[in-house]
Image (cartoon, rainbow, N blue to C red):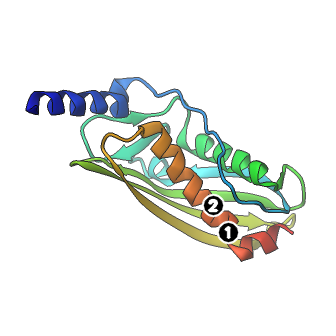
Amino acid sequence: MKSIAAAAFAALGLVVSGCAESIPIEYTPSSTLTAAGAVKVGDFAYEPTLKGKMKPNQIHNTAMGTVLLDKNVDVFYRNAVFTELRFVGVKVGTGDKTLTGDIKEFLIDDLGYSVDWTIDVDYRITDSAGAVVYESDKFTKNHTSKFANAIGALQQQMKVNIEELIKDPAFIKAIN
């Protein structure tokens, strides 16, 4: 039984770590929320990369190995925000306001027998004159089994963080 568990953990480690290969991934929107408004989605910054702590396509994890995506984290997250907002009913790419953000932390704490997923994003909306009309930090954390679908759990955690933005009445007011 111990050898089966060890083999399962090793297999999961290979899947999550990427083994120096990047994981091809596309974000699939899945929110059941609805929202109205209009906003352009601008650039997002991945702070761990700016601080030299991570590669641009690397998600911080605590276990052995490296989680590398096939695209940069800032681009992947920005595209997720764009598609999720469009999916819930926001008119993206229009209006005189632009949503940007700083991804302060994107962590997979996978050391041990379970996984804690953490995302911390500072979202900002600026008007056409460049004035900040909305700013809010959204910090979300989820806990999953080590044997959960890693890609599904990753996307679920991103969705939860983006939904915190969508549920914020000040955000909805800023895009209307």
Q: Which residue is mark 1?
A: 167
Quadrant where the C terminus lies? bottom right
Q: Which quarter of the figure has residue 22?
A: top left
Residue drawn at point x = 42 percent, y = 38 percent: 149
Above or below for 59 versus 18: below
Q: Position of residue 127 (x, y in %)?
A: 83, 67
The front one of 169 and 152 is 152
Residue 143: x and y, percent? 37, 56
For the point 48% across and 45% down, which residue is it?
Answer: 154
Asked if disc 1 and disc 2 are in contact, CB closer than 8 Å, the reply is yes
Would you identify the image quadrant in which residue 3 lies? top left
Q: Residues within 10 Å of mark 1 (few under 14, many from 20)?
A: few
Residue under label 2, please give it. 163
Q: Is residue 123 visible?
A: no
Residue 43 location (% of width, % of height): 68, 49
143 relative to 7 in the view: left or right? right
